[in-house]
């Protein structure tokens, strides 16, 4: 039987489509081995979380793969992020990074050690926690609110900027390294403090302070553990200085981010989808395995948090200018 022209064309097109599907399948196959760069030290909290994430992602891939954790540098993640920024696009899904909030904060304030631009790194998933400004009002209404912070370059400075935007006078109280902010409150040295993680409301009650508001981000769900507490966005729905509102959310986002798993810029969409699918399967597998005080987020909310953490250059510049103008501080 002689095939018709239509039949021949159909067969050719069908074969071409099958070839494209096979090629796509090959291009999205999981790597046999991959590396997850994480902030050090080896026995630190970030590396421990990275090992847990590596195990979950490896199980979630459609093909078996070995995902090794490599702890690099210190806990702030700057060294790890710098190394990650040098990864060639040819690695194509074989290297990931656990980006902590502190590494994004370093880039926000202009720390000269931070030689990376995370805004274009595709987010796979992440672990987030709430951050709340809590305090008690000074005895005199004219007195500034003293906010306990580790340093002006730290993410906790978000509390100072938030109060500035709300029209309240503030003064930073820089606490010594290793001292808990609770001590500054207990000793009457500070009026307000930023609290993160688990049991924020009971901790505030034990310290004798009142939670004032939580920090929010566009595209992220409201904190389920704090349903009755207003967010900064609730208090400032139409801020007079929207760029500084983005800046305060960026700094506060560094406090709220335990870690975001990201891929290098220019990673193909198919490879990004493969890792994001693995993250979703990991989340389904360990629904009750979230660390206390945190919530695991999929690619959508992780990408929203990355956009909050790493705003446009004009936002970072406005934050640095605010630090210089208010406190005569700039990053080294």
Image (cartoon, rainbow, N blue to C red):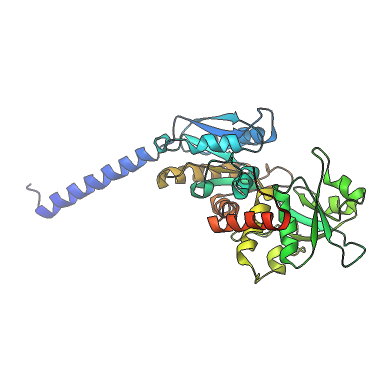
In the foreground, 155 or 331:
331
As drawn, 253 above or below 212? above
> At which x and y percent is residue 312?
53, 56
Q: Is residue 191 visible?
A: yes
As drawn, 89 above or below 205? above
> At which x and y percent is residue 168?
78, 65
Q: How many numbered marks does the figure carry?
A: 0
Direction from residue 242 to residue 181 in the image, left or right: right
Q: Is residue 312 visible?
A: no
Direction from residue 177 to residue 220 in the image, left or right: left
| Residue at image point 60% right, 63% down | 243
| Residue at image point 86% right, 47% down | 182
Splitting the image into 4 quarters, where does residue 332 fall? Answer: top right
Direction from residue 136 to residue 113 in the image, left or right: left
> At which x and y percent is residue 212?
80, 61
In the foreground, 136 or 283:
136
> At which x and y percent is residue 89?
41, 38
As drawn, 68 above or below 11? above
Splitting the image into 4 quarters, where does residue 292 fall? Answer: top right
In the foreground, 181 or 170:
170
Direction from residue 203 to residue 98 in the image, left or right: left
């Amino acid at each position: 039987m002689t095939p018709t022209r239509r039949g021949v064309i159909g067969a050719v097109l069908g074969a071409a489509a099958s070839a494209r599907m096979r090629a796509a399948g090959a291009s999205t196959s999981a790597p046999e081995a991959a590396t997850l760069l994480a902030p050090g030290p080896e026995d630190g909290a970030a590396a421990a979380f990275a090992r847990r994430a590596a195990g979950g992602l490896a199980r979630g891939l459609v093909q078996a793969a070995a995902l090794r954790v490599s702890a690099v540098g210190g806990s702030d993640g700057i060294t790890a992020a710098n190394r990650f920024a040098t990864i060639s696009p040819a690695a194509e899904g074989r290297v990931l990074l656990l980006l902590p909030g502190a590494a994004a904060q370093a880039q926000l304030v202009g720390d000269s050690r931070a030689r990376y631009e995370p805004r274009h790194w595709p987010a796979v998933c992440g672990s987030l926690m709430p951050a709340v400004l809590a305090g008690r009002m000074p005895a005199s209404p004219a007195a500034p609110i003293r906010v306990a912070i580790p340093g002006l370059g730290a993410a906790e400075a978000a509390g100072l900027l938030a109060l500035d935007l709300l029209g309240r006078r503030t003064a930073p109280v820089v606490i010594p390294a290793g001292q808990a902010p609770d001590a500054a409150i207990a000793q009457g040295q500070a009026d307000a403090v930023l609290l993160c993680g688990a049991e924020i409301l009971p901790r505030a009650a034990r310290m004798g302070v009142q939670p004032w508001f939580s920090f929010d981000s566009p595209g992220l769900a409201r904190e389920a553990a704090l349903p009755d507490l207003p967010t900064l966005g609730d208090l400032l729905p139409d801020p007079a200085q929207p760029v500084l509102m983005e800046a305060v959310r960026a700094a506060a986002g560094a406090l709220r981010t335990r870690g975001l798993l990201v891929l290098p810029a220019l990673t193909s969409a198919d490879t990004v989808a493969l890792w994001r699918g693995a993250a979703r399967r990991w989340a389904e597998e360990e629904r009750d395995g979230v660390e206390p005080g945190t919530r695991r987020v999929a690619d959508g909310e992780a990408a929203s948090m990355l956009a909050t953490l790493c705003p446009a250059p004009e936002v970072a510049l406005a934050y640095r200018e605010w630090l210089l103008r208010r406190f005569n501080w700039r990053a080294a």
